[in-house]
Structures are given as structure tokens and as C-alpha cells.
Image (cartoon, grey):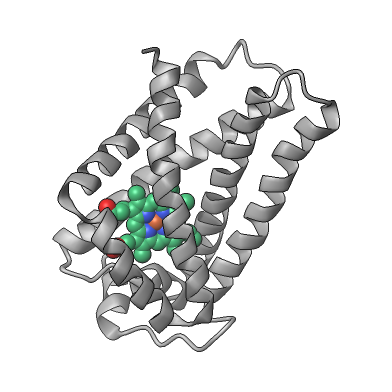
Amino acid sequence: MTPRKLHALSAMVITAFACLHIANHLVGLGGASAHIAFMETARLVYRARAVEWVLLACIGFQIVSGLVFVIRGWKQRHGGIAWLQAASGAYLSFFLAVHVGAVLSGRAALGLDTNFYFAAAGFHVAPFQFFFAPYYFLAVLALFTHLGCAAYWQSEGRPRLARALMVAVPCAAGAVISLLIVLSLAGALFRVDIPASYKATYDQSTP
Ligand code: HEM
């Protein structure tokens, strides 16, 4: 199997998790308790030991293989979609390395339940909201954009407009979904009271 095929296969595993994960954040638009209740059930699936190891292995592989593709293809890359795919992939590599590292160390080193409050805390301790708002907004946007670009390359031979929509629709949906999630974490949709134990982590500046 070629590295590109492995990258696509690993992307399928990550996308399956991401659907559940983003559904979790969308349920969170109804409040922190709804988010936490959904996550407790979803964890039964993705925190099952074998599932989590496969997921984390795919994340690790995706980060490294994605960066290799971005760098190796630098000089041969032509056209807006190719660059959009590379830019969204590069951002996802950065985001996933920082995000998964933060979640795992939040759990193992800080002993925190990495729930809604863990994700939201940075929005409620100045000046960290200026980091977290673009950091999370771009993550969900990059994921949708990257998948849209993949669909574009799979649809050669289709009319130009249909192919353009395969990128434009996911980008627009990603931007709206992302904005709603960021607003909920920032406390713009409902009141968010962050427990002191989560705010305290910002003494060590954990993203
Ligand atoms: C607004 C955007 C996001 C927020 C607020 C967020 C928040 C979180 C939180 C709170 C956890 C801990 C889950 C738990 O303890 O069960 C987590 C875990 C994780 N997130 Fe995200 N996430 C976001 C976007 C993403 C995206 C786009 C991906 C890419 C697929 C992603 C991948 C992961 C992975 C792989 C884990 C680790 C799962 C585990 O093994 O426990 N996240 N995220």
C-alpha cells in the first residue's frame, strides 16, 4: 500500500472519530451539562483501550505523513485547491499535535477530566481567548476544508461547478459550525462558569 493510500485510510478512522467529536460539540450548544453527558457516553466508544490506541496511532501517522506530503510536494504544487489542501493539512498537523498533547497531558499529568470546561477554560482567562478563538475556529474549518479538497480530487470528470461546490459547501459549513462551537465555549450562547481547578492550569499556560 502506498503512503498516500495509508494517509487516506488513516483519515477515514480520524474522520469517523471527528464526526462523533463534532456532534459532541454541537450538542454542547445546548449547554455544558448536555456536552458532558454526551461525552460520557461517547467515551465508552473512543476511550475503549483498543479503539483509543488505533485512533492515537492514526493521529500520529497523519501528523507526520501530512507534513511530509506538504514539504515534498512544495515545488510541484499548482492551483488554488492544491494549496488549500496543503494549508489546511499543515494546520491540522499543528493543531492535532498541540490538541492531543494537551488533552493527554491534561488527563495524565494534571489529573483533570478533559471535558467541556477543559476546552472552554482558556476562553475565560485573559489573554488566552486571543489564542483559543482562532486555534479552535481554524481547526474545524481546516478539517472540513481538507475533506472537501479530498472530495474534489476524487471527482475528476464531473462538471466544474459541481467540483467547486464540493470544496465550497464543506468550507462554508465548517465555518458556521466552527463559529457556533467557539461561541458556546466562549460563553456567548449560555452562561459558562469555569471551575477553579481548570482556570488554575493557566498558571502553567497549558493550551
Ligand atoms: C472546537 C474544536 C474542538 C474542541 C473544543 C475539542 C475539544 C476536545 C476535548 C475536550 C477533548 C477531550 C475528550 C475526552 O476527554 O473524552 C478532545 C479530545 C480529542 N480531540 Fe478534540 N476538540 C476540537 C476539535 C478537534 C478536531 C477538529 C479534531 C480532529 C479530528 C480533534 C481530535 C481530538 C482527538 C484525537 C482527541 C483525543 C481523544 C482521546 O483519545 O481521548 N479535536 N477534544
Q: What quarter of the picture does the C terminus occupy?
A: bottom left
Above or below, comparing residue 67 to residue 180 in the picture: above
Counting from the top left corner in percent of width and height, residue 37 is at: 35, 77
Identify the residue at image location x=72%, y=46%.
169
Counting from the top left corner in percent of width and height, residue 105 is at: 21, 57
Above or below, comparing residue 75 to residue 21 in the picture: above
Query: Camera-side residue: 93 or 18?
Result: 18
State which quadrant residue 158 falls in: top right
Counting from the top left corner in percent of width and height, residue 159 is at: 83, 26
Q: Quadrant of ligand 1?
A: bottom left
Above or below, comparing residue 106 to residue 37 in the picture: above
* Residue 95 shows up from this direction: no
Query: Camera-side residue: 158 or 73?
Result: 158
Identify the residue at image location x=27%, y=71%.
201
State which quadrant residue 73 falls in: top right
Q: What quarter of the picture does the N terminus occupy?
A: top left
Identify the residue at image location x=29%, y=76%.
198
Identify the residue at image location x=23%, y=71%.
113
Counting from the top left corner in percent of width and height, residue 162 is at: 80, 34
Query: Camera-side residue: 129 or 10?
Result: 10
* Residue 12 shows up from this direction: yes
Query: Camera-side residue: 94 or 139?
Result: 139
Would residue 69 appear left or right of 161 to someone viewing this image?
left
Q: How many marks?
A: 0
